Image: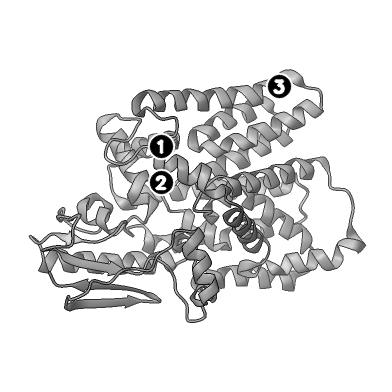
Amino acid sequence: MLFAAAHVPLLSLPFHWDELGYFIPAALDLWRDGHLVPQTTLANIHPPGVPLYLAGVWTIFGYSIAVTRAAMLVLAIVTALASWSLARRLGVASPLAAVVFLLASPLFFMQAMMAQLDMPAMLFTTVALLYFLAGRLGPALVVCVLLVLAKETGLIAPMVLAGWLALDRRYRWAAAFALLPAAVLLAWILYLRQHTGLSVGNAEFGWYNLVYPLHPVRLAAAVLRRVSYLFFEEFRWIPTLVLLLSARRTWSAPSRPWRVVLSFAVLHVAGVTVVGGAVLERYLLPALPILYAAAARVLEGRPALQAALAAGLVASLFLNPPFWPFPHENNLAMVDFVRLQQIAAADLETRYPATPVFTTWPLSDALKRPELGYVSRPLTVSEAPEGAVYVVYSTDWDPPANLIRLAPVRALVTRYFMQKPPRRPSGRALDKRWEQKGFWLEVYRP
């Protein structure tokens, strides 16, 4: 209940980044006009499971930001309960500790209310693993089908489970787990191809998520980022250090349930590291119940360290990394970013109601669609700066000790990661400037 209550002040927070760029427009297109393939935003390979869920919720309760965030929060709470059951199934002496770590995790806290695919994928993955470990293969297979309808990378889980069934010489079940979810996902891809001409929905999405990540420099950086996040950041260095120091004394071969879930976690993390240009931490959500169950197992009998990890996770909800940028949605930085854009959007609507606005995405989409929570009526967004209000803002957290400010690092980032600093206009008078906990936004007169 405390977890749900902590989200109440945020339920009306306007949509952020990929929510406003894809997921909410896609769900609205389905709810309003019945389009499984989005019409008001660029289509991509993401299956329609989450838009179908949101459209069903809106049909019952009506559309609003608060209803949408509450609907996602319900899924998150069910996921936490399933994670507790998974920790018990894995033999963790204190499954409650695993759930406390998960609930305290900044990433889980933020994604719990966000209209994106990864929390539902986390729910279905956890439930599928639970059914599988209990020997209930039929329900596990059904949940795996729901999983691939929620997110395409969900196919990793049934493939891993098919591999374990093949090792057990249960070949019919292995074939079912390998083929049925894949067939359902293939049917969606064929449907998408029929409506867009491309199997991935649009060429830019396919290149960015399938080709761009494979450059050796980007791939090495992605691996380092995954290792850093999973095992060191947000005070997760505590269980990592305990494990390294005690492994020689306490090592024993893991049980079969642990081997199953760890094999999934490793292959899932590897899969979302190789696929996905943005290397977002939210892609790791399906592995988090396993990570925190392992942390609870490592810290058994060490209540002070358990409390330190939980406190560190909660503190990380408010504390941004001191040395590098990170996705806003990983902690409450998202709220700071959204509030800043909300203030600026309200000011533009009041002072420049008939003047075109020149700015970059995601603010450009936020100004055009009132249902996203930033404006009460659409503003005109210009593709050229001439005669328009010019709005420029920071898109990244830029701490004073940001390592990217070092010339060699900046050169590497500019060359390999397509990151460019915001461009202020020349010869224009600054109209207004706002700052919000490390983020800034400037408005220049036309």
Q: Name the residue under label 1.
A: 53
Question: For this rendering, which residue is in front, 406 or 150?
Answer: 406
Q: Earlier in the sequence, mark 2 or mark 1?
A: 1
The mark lying in front, picked from 1 and 3, is: 3
Residue furthest toward the bottom?
A: 400
Residue 285 visible, this angle? no
Which residue appears at 36% of the width and 67% of the height?
337
Q: Do the residues labelled 1 and 3 touch (CB within 8 Å)?
A: no
426 on left or right of 335: left
Secondary structure at numbered mark 1? helix
Give the CA separation, mark 1 to mark 3. 29 Å
Render colour scheme:
one colour
Q: Mark 3 points at which residue?
A: 173
Specify the amino acid type for callout 3: Trp
Q: Which of 90 and 410 is in front in this view?
A: 410
To which residue does mark 2 refer? Answer: 71
Dot 3, crowdedness within 10 Å: few (<14), some or many (≥20)? some
Amino acid type at circle 2 is Ala
Residue 102: x and y in percent read: 60, 57
Q: Distance between the residues labelled 2 and 1?
A: 9 Å
Of callouts 2 and 3, which one flags the residue occurring earlier in the amino acid sequence? 2
Extreme residue toward the top, this view: 172
Label 3: which secondary element: helix
Q: How crowded is mark 1: few (under 14 residues within 10 Å), some or many (20 or more)?
A: some
Q: Where is residue 205 in the image (x, y as percent from the top left)?
A: 42, 42
* Residue at figure coordinates x 24%, y 61% from the top left: 359
